[in-house]
Image: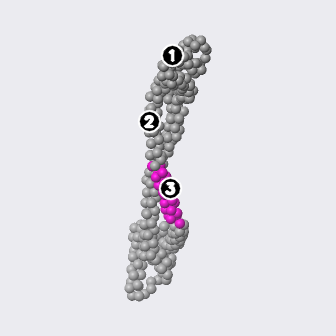
Amino acid sequence: MSTDQDGMKKALRAARLARLIERIQELDDGTLEVLDRMTAEAVKGMEVGIRPQGIDRRRFLGAAAGGAVIAGLGGLALWQWDERRIALLQGEVSALRELVDLYAELEAVALDEPVAQGLSTVGRLVEGLQGMVEGLGDAVAAARSALLDFQATFPSLQASMQWLRSNLSTVSQRLLGLENEVSRALGLSGPITETMGAFLAEVLDRLPATPRAQLGAALERMGEVVTAVPLLVQGLYTRILEPMGDWFSSRSSEGLSNVIVNPLLTTVLDPLEALIEAIAGLAASWQAELVEPVQQHLDERREIRSRIARLRQERGI
């Protein structure tokens, strides 16, 4: 007899004994007496080496006549019920074996290794992103600090621009006054850059020979300085004050705060910081909500698989 048949026989015997014990509790005295005599004869026959006869319908009805009630469940006689139960148990065992085979086929589909490999691959990517955003976070913090420090200097720079504008206005007014006086003295009309040379020449002509020789070079240098001042004033206006006049104003729409600093802060650095926080949160959630639970389940599956293998080896399944 094969191992499978022997296991089936033991299972059927245990199931039959359990059913008999349950049914005996509900039998009447007559039927119990019949069963008592029959089981006693069967045991006695086994002790002396005599093969007991099978219990057929005729023997059971004859023994139970005279007050014994035929034991039946659901309208079936005891032997009929027993045969049917055996058939049902055989079907259940067959279904269970088929189910076990299906579970074995399901387990044969490789799942744990691809899941572990996927976790490892994505984990390396998450770790790489986490390392990148750590450096990016330092760069964003440094850029924000530099922009805010630069913006903090705008009030003093704006005050300097106002000071320059005021002093250039004063210099321009005084140059205009000088130009008017020179033109009136010479009886000429023209800008100071054109009349200053004639004015100095007139002054030198009116000086005696000795002072003229001593002061000539100095007066020429002074004329060069005076004639250069209007160009300097004009250049400061056109190259600095006009293009940069509102750069450092916090109220101007063309100021650096509204054109450069604030846009960089709100449209570049703020989103970058939000991205850094999101990636940090992703890394934490990835580890706590996916990697650790999945790894725990994989370990549990590995342990259960090991227990199944040991059981099958012990039972010869």
Q: Nearer the viewer, mark 3 or mark 2?
A: 2
Describe residue 42's horizontal placement relative to residue 80 as left or right: left
Residues packed near mark 2 inside 10 Å, few (<14), some (14 to 19) or many (20 plus): few
Q: Nearer the viewer, mark 1 or mark 3?
A: 1
Residue 120 forms part of the magenta stretch: yes
284 above or below 57?
above
Tell me, yes or no, whether the two marked residues, 1 and 2, touch with CB atoms within 8 Å.
no
> In the drawing, what numbered circle is on residue 125?
3
**Residue that mark 2 sits on:** 149
- Residue in view at x 53 percent, y 15 percent: 206
Q: How did the renderer colour the structure?
A: one colour
Give the CA distance from mark 3 to mark 2.
36 Å
Q: Which residues are magenta?
A: 110-134
Q: Earlier in the sequence, mark 1 or mark 2?
A: 2
User: At which x and y percent is residue 289?
Assistant: 45, 53
Q: Residue furthest front?
A: 209
Tell me, yes or no, whether the two marked residues, 3 and 2, touch with CB atoms within 8 Å.
no
Q: Secondary structure at mark 3?
A: helix
- Residue in view at x 44 percent, y 46 percent: 138
Q: Secondary structure at mark 2?
A: helix
Q: Nearer the viewer, residue 78 or 243?
A: 243
Q: Earlier in the sequence, mark 1 or mark 3?
A: 3
- Residue in view at x 46 percent, y 77 percent: 316
301 above or below 63?
above
- Residue in view at x 49 percent, y 57 percent: 124
Q: Residue furthest right?
A: 189
**Residue that mark 1 sits on:** 207
User: At which x and y percent is residue 218?
Assistant: 49, 24
Amino acid at the residue labelled 3: Leu
Q: Is residue 81 visible?
A: no
